[in-house]
Amino acid sequence: MQIIDTATTRRHLGFAPLIDALRRMFESGCEVPLRHTHRIGEAGTLLLMPAWRDGRRLGIKTVTIFPGNSTRQLPGLHSTYLLFDAATGVPLAQLDGNEITSRRTAAASALAASFLARPDARSLLIVGTGRVAALLAEAMRAVRPIDAVTVWNHRPASAQALAAQLTGAGIDARVSGDLASAVASADIISCATLSTAPLIRGEWLRPGTHLDLIGSFTPQMREADAACFARSRVFVDTPEALAKSGDVLEAVQAGAFSDAQLQGTLAELCQGTRPGRSDAAERTLFKSVGTALEDLAAAELVFDAVRGGATV
């Protein structure tokens, strides 16, 4: 079994090829059982996320979440990815799960934006400053002509740090302390936070805006109010988002959205069975909670590049 380290995993997950790999996997599909969740001790959690294509590849992502690690000066989350031959069960590789998760998450948002954001979208607002948020500008620039990035975070110092990082990478980035005005002037708004209260309000969204919601992957989390759903055509990565996301559940409870109003999933967009953006004035919303399909696509991309000796 090949051990593929962090740097190598990252090197072979450039956003252009990764977005294309996700598109092809959503088009063809794979087996994705519901994730397994197990309690470990008093506060630990173990997640197991399998996915496979019969006769081809099988992958399992393991995620350990131990909130108490902060007192030990350790990260609270660790992730690994194991790739197998699905015809024989032979282990092929172990990869860095953190790199796979963060980069495939940003790539999935960019893939959705390729269908839902205006083709001429040039301004991006990033809400949040974590691992995924730091990748969103690069990912979105792979599908849209983004030339101006604004960063907002409830901790201004973190927003300044991310804006400086993006500027150092050659991206025109600045910080905004006024979230309402930043939302109102952005073509694409991408939120990657752990917020439990709405940050984005529907009344701030101008015509033609695309809203990308990455956080809120549990019923207790929220990044957008119900009005965002009422004022937008709503898409999700998978149907699991309808039952898992606090954003969606609260919008349903408020009467602003129903499952029947869902415009489509990312697979349906990729397969061409549901239309994406239909005109320049409509507001679109993409809600993701993540899927093991994306992990498998990313892991295969890395493994095939390493095995072939190519650098993507």
Image (spheres, rainbow, N blue to C red):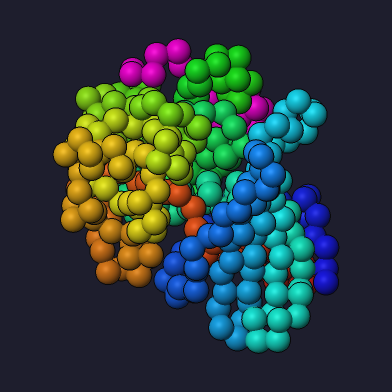
Residue 307: x %, y % from top left: 77, 72
**Which residue is found at the position 43% from the left and 29% from the top?**
196
**Which residue is found at the position 59% from the left and 66% from the top?**
50
Residue 264: x %, y % from top left: 28, 58
Q: Quadrant of residue 48?
A: bottom right
| In the image, residue 284 above or below residue 191 | below
Q: How many marks?
A: 0
Q: Which residues are magenta?
A: 164-181
Report the front residue among 147 and 288: 288
Residue 105: x %, y % from top left: 53, 49
Q: Is residue 33 found left or right of 248 in the rendered image?
A: right
Q: Residue furthest front?
A: 42
Q: Is residue 224 visible?
A: yes
Q: Is residue 107 found left or right of 259 in the rendered image?
A: right
Report the front residue among 132 and 257: 257
| In the image, residue 74 above or below residue 249 | above
Was residue 238 drawn as part of the magenta stretch in this picture?
Answer: no
**Which residue is found at the position 16% from the left and 39% from the top?**
255
Q: Quadrant of the N terminus?
A: bottom right
Residue 288: x %, y % from top left: 42, 49
Q: Is residue 106 found left or right of 280 in the rendered image?
A: right
**Which residue is found at the position 31% from the left and 43% from the top?**
248
Q: Is residue 172 visible?
A: no
| In the image, residue 131 above or below residue 106 | above
Q: Is residue 263 found left or right of 60 in the rendered image?
A: left
Report the front residue among 161 and 261: 261
Q: Quadrant of the C terminus?
A: bottom right
